[in-house]
Image (cartoon, coloured by chain):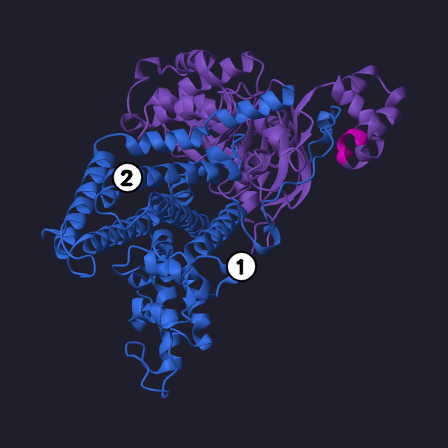
């Protein structure tokens, strides 16, 4: 019982490193200025997409069968806003998270405070977790500050509350993974500038690289991703199983995952003409996540055809679900690696994974020896 | 108590872990018939003990610490003297669990730094040579942060921070930013940070480097105060004069080895045989001065070209290689040569020069 109480006490007590980092980060007007600018840009972007989607037209009355007018149009605006807001959040995560953790260890090394921390009971593990947690709290704070803007989509419809939750799951796991990547390179390189730069390269590869790879493979198979198959000359990327692999690669792409939230069964191979009708452009396989969303359908057709589709991810996982799973793995991997490489003196010989060692016996006292023991 | 119980339960673990103790016990058994004084020596409690310590950095051929053995009795201020690169900082880093030893071990209050680094960290306070401070914090906050790292919270922590600031004479700077502190103040603050968890052993790496004489004096007073509080202080420096006054014992480190250990006098007696001493001689007349000069050149142990003559003061300064007996011989030699010596004095024992020259060879 005592053990349980002590353990829960330890859990409740904040890591002093996290507290210090948060205090240092939020001190002064800088953090608040950043937050203000960020929300202003998000608001402006949302407004621009709203106007560009024709939100200024009177769409409340009209024929539902016309996709440029009426409630269908309203849903389209809602879905456009959803995609815009969450993609913006992904880019904010990709920019801010590695910069926050890129100095986790390197700034301590550069500021010559690393050794002061190492001799305290704060070990490498709590140091990295503390820094990681403080970065995470800040990026989460940024993401959650966008909730009021994100909820504007409910005015237009076309997006369900659980879609917003899924969007946030993608954004937050991405932010956490990017922060872990930053922490890893900070421990590895020990210089803040280069560490942040390398983290940005890796994050850019994850955000954009998977889409580029996917569309490159489609182009290689098809010869052209942007046109309908001409008779039987080219395989149709929408229906041909040869294209399953490039579609699967998209589990690394946060942008495709945001798109897939609105198309719950994506990625899939359409089996009948309805799907082809509502997924007309083969840019889907060029990596444009917009193609995952139900253009102007409000969901009715997609659900009708759900059974006719063949899922291409294991167990019929939706792309965004698989994305969250894969990025949890990336997050855990980079966190463990950053603890492993954070030793003050590193060499291949000393490289050990930071798993908990088995508990050892209590120490014994050494009896005092002769002072004359001092010898060269 | 539980330690003892555990000790009995794991008899096979003792030999590997306690080589020093075993050696001491065997010695004690052997010398049981010897005078009581010898036995007494074994009972001096030790706070720090390095046993056969080796340290080699990755991708380096030479050893930074080469069979380093050292015992520091509890409650002493112990000086570690050596040139830059002699291995002082490496030794202190191994003691403070920052670097793992390549071979051998260090025991802090009986805890092996290899096996029980967490326990050791609670026992030591470490102040590195080249340390940084969090510039974005205030003085009080800085200490509170390190106190939190040791699990201290609430009122207890506030009280402790105030006490420590009093001790290092920074109480009036509590809310000041760390940016504005002078070098001496930063040194004192860093020392205070090493004391937040009331450690038994303090490891201070060149605490007096780069500070003005007043700050150095204050630091010496602080070290004495800490020693009075019962703490063992291991302090390193590359200048003997900095530590000579304040240290109970000193150890001289050279190329990763301990070459001499003891009080300054002991070292001078043991190693002074080959050390260089500067002797000043004042004579009565100018004629005496000439005779003295002639005699000096003939005296075998005089260091070549070291004779300095001050005619106005009728004084002669000579460097002599050798121990105190050599100085006495020199005086006798002068008297025999018919020199009327008015004053004869030994100016300084240049231990450092001796060790530095040895190192250069």
Q: Residue B162 placed where, x, y %?
A: 40, 12
Q: Residue B191 placed where, x, y %?
A: 45, 24
Q: Nearer the viewer, mark 1 or mark 2?
A: 1
Residue with the mark numbered 1:
A315
Q: Residue B184 placed where, x, y %?
A: 35, 25
Q: Colour of chain A?
A: blue
In the image, residue A180 above or below residue A204: above
* Camera-side residue of A120 and A101: A101
Residue with the mark numbered 2:
A147
Q: State yes or no: residue A231 in magenta.
A: no
Give the chain letter at badge 1: A
The reply to whether callout 1 and callout 2 are in contact (CB within 8 Å) is no
Q: State yes or no: residue B22 in magenta.
A: yes
Relative to B271, A60 lies left or right: left
Looking at the rendering, the stretch of residues picked out in magenta corresponds to: B17-23
Give the chain letter at badge 2: A
Tell me the crowding category of disc 2: few under 14, some 14 to 19, or many 20 or more residues within 10 angstroms, Cα based. few
In the image, residue A328 above or below residue B176: below
Q: Colour of chain B?
A: purple
In this view, the residue farthest toward the bottom is A233
Q: Secondary structure at mark 2?
A: helix
* Camera-side residue of B320 and A319: A319
């Amino acid at each position: 019982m005592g053990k349980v109480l002590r353990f829960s006490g330890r859990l409740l007590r904040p890591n002093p490193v996290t507290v210090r980092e948060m205090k240092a980060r939020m001190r002064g007007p800088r953090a608040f200025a950043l937050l203000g600018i960020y929300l202003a840009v998000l608001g402006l972007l949302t407004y621009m997409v709203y106007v560009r989607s024709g939100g200024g037209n009177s769409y409340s009355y009209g024929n539902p069968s016309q996709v440029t007018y009426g409630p269908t149009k309203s849903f389209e605006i809602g879905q456009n806003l959803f995609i815009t807001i969450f993609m913006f959040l992904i880019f904010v995560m990709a920019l801010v998270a590695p910069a926050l953790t890129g100095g986790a260890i390197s700034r301590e090394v550069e500021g010559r405070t690393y050794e002061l921390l190492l001799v305290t009971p704060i070990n490498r593990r709590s140091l990295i977790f503390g820094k990681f947690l403080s970065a995470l709290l800040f990026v989460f704070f940024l993401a959650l500050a966008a909730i009021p803007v994100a909820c504007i989509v409910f005015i237009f419809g076309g997006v369900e509350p659980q879609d917003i939750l899924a969007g946030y799951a993608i954004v937050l796991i991405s932010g956490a993974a990017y922060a872990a990547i930053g922490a890893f390179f900070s421990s590895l390189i020990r210089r803040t500038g280069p560490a942040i730069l390398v983290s940005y390269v890796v994050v850019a590869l994850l955000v954009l690289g998977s889409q580029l790879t996917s569309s490159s493979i489609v182009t290689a198979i098809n010869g052209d991703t942007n046109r309908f198959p001409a008779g039987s000359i080219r395989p149709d990327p929408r229906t041909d199983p040869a294209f399953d692999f490039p579609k699967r690669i998209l589990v690394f792409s946060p942008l495709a995952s945001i798109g897939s939230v609105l198309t719950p069964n994506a990625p899939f191979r359409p089996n009948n003409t309805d799907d082809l009708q509502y997924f007309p452009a083969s840019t889907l396989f060029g990596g444009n996540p917009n193609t995952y969303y139900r253009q102007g359908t409000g969901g009715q057709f997609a659900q009708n055809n759900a059974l006719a589709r063949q899922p291409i991810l294991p167990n019929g996982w939706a792309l965004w679900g698989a994305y969250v799973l894969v990025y949890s793995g990336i997050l855990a991997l980079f966190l463990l690696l950053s603890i492993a490489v954070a030793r003050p003196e590193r060499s291949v010989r000393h490289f050990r994974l930071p798993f908990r060692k088995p508990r050892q016996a209590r120490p014994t006292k050494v009896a005092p020896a002769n002072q004359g023991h001092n010898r060269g | 108590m539980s330690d003892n119980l555990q000790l009995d339960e794991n008899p096979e673990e003792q030999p590997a872990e306690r080589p020093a103790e075993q050696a001491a016990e065997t010695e004690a058994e052997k010398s049981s018939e010897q005078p009581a004084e010898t036995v007494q020596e074994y009972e001096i409690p030790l706070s720090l003990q390095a046993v056969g310590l080796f340290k080699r950095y990755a991708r380096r051929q030479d050893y930074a610490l080469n069979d380093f053995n050292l015992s520091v009795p509890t409650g002493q201020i112990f000086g570690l003297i050596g040139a830059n690169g002699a291995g002082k900082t490496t030794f202190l880093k191994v003691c403070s669990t920052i670097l793992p030893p390549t071979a051998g071990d260090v025991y802090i209050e009986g805890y092996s730094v290899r096996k029980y680094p967490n326990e050791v960290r609670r026992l030591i306070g470490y102040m590195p040579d080249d340390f940084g401070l969090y510039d974005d914090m205030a003085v009080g906050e800085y200490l509170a942060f390190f106190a939190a790292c040791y699990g201290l919270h609430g009122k207890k922590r506030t009280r402790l921070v105030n006490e420590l600031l009093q001790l290092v004479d920074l109480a009036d700077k509590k809310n000041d930013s760390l940016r504005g502190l002078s070098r001496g103040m930063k040194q004192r603050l860093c020392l205070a940070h090493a004391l937040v968890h009331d450690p038994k052993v303090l490891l201070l790496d060149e605490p007096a480097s780069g500070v003005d004489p007043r700050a150095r004096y204050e630091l010496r007073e602080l070290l004495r105060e800490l020693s009075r509080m019962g703490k063992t202080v291991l302090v390193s420096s590359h200048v003997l004069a900095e530590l000579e006054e304040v240290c109970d014992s000193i150890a001289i480190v050279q190329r990763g080895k301990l070459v001499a250990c003891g009080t300054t006098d002991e070292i001078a007696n043991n190693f002074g045989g080959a050390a260089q001493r500067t002797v000043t001689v004042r004579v009565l007349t100018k004629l005496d001065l000439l005779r003295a000069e002639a005699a000096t050149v003939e005296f075998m142990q005089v260091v070549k070209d070291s004779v300095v003559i001050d005619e106005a003061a009728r004084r002669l300064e000579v460097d002599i290689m050798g121990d105190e007996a050599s100085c006495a011989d020199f005086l006798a030699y002068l008297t025999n040569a018919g020199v009327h010596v008015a004053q004869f004095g030994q100016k300084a024992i240049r231990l450092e020069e001796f060790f530095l020259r040895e190192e250069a060879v």
